[in-house]
């Protein structure tokens, strides 16, 4: 849900500020993916009605945020809230990795692509939008993704212990 809030904030902020699609387009597709995953989690828990309600509520919130009646200050606050969302989400993951003494099933390619992508987004945000809030969000994201990438390398040869089956 933190990721969905962050993606929604980036997308809405970019649309309202008329940034080029190339500066925020991936947020649209990641948002669609995340909404789908949220629905599927509820669906496979046997809570399909809650999943549909979630989709409807999210669509209404999105329409409200994109409405011309929504004050720019609210949208700017939503975008600014991305930084704490990213930090909390990644630090929770980093703390879990540290506590476990390994990164579990974390995909090396995914972590490294996230890190590289967030580094690239700093440059593209500065070039395409000139917006310090957007660039700052990706700086914070890069630092957090760098921490997870460093843990992945540090725990590279450490395997998660196998759980024994109950007989």
Image (cartoon, rainbow, N blue to C red):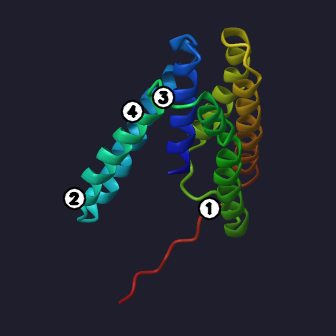
Choose top left, top right, bottom left or bottom right for residue 61: top left
Q: Which residue is mark 2?
A: 49
Q: Which residue is mark 1?
A: 159
Q: Earlier in the sequence, mark 1 or mark 2?
A: 2
Tell me residue 154's x, y (percent).
76, 51
Q: Earlier in the sequence, mark 1 or mark 3?
A: 3
Q: Earlier in the sequence, mark 1 or mark 4?
A: 4
Dot 3 lies on which element? loop
Choose top left, top right, bottom left or bottom right for residue 111: top right
Residue at 55% in and 10% down: 20
Dot 1 lies on which element? loop
Dot 2 lies on which element? helix
Q: Image quadrant for the C terminus?
A: bottom left
Q: Which residue is mark 4?
A: 63
Please name whichever residue, 114 or 49, is drawn nearer the observer in this view of the structure. Answer: 49
Foreground disc of the pair 4, 2 = 4
Q: Which residue is mark 3?
A: 69
Foreground disc of the pair 1, 4 = 4
Tell me residue 25's x, y (percent).
49, 20
Furthest residue to the front?
Answer: 69
**Cα distance between the residues tagged 1 and 4:** 45 Å
**Cα distance between the residues tagged 4 and 3:** 11 Å
Q: Earlier in the sequence, mark 4 or mark 3?
A: 4
Furthest residue to the bottom?
Answer: 167
Instruction: Say above or below: 112 vs 126.
Output: below
Foreground disc of the pair 3, 2 = 3
């Amino acid at each position: 849900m933190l990721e969905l809030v962050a993606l929604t904030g980036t997308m809405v902020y970019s649309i309202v500020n008329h940034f080029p699609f190339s500066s925020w387009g991936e947020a649209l597709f990641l948002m669609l993916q995340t909404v789908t995953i949220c629905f599927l989690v509820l669906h496979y828990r046997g809570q399909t009605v809650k999943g549909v309600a979630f989709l409807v509520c999210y669509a209404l919130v999105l329409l409200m945020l994109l409405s011309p009646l929504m004050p720019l200050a609210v949208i700017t606050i939503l975008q600014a809230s991305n930084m704490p969302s990213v930090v909390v989400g990644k630090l929770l993951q980093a703390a879990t990795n540290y506590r476990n003494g390994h990164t579990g099933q974390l995909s090396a390619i995914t972590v490294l692509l996230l890190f590289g992508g967030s580094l690239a987004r700093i440059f593209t945000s500065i070039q395409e939008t000139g917006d310090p809030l957007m660039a700052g969000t990706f700086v914070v994201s890069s630092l957090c993704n760098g921490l997870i990438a460093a843990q992945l390398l540090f725990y590279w040869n450490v395997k998660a212990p196998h759980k024994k089956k109950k007989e």
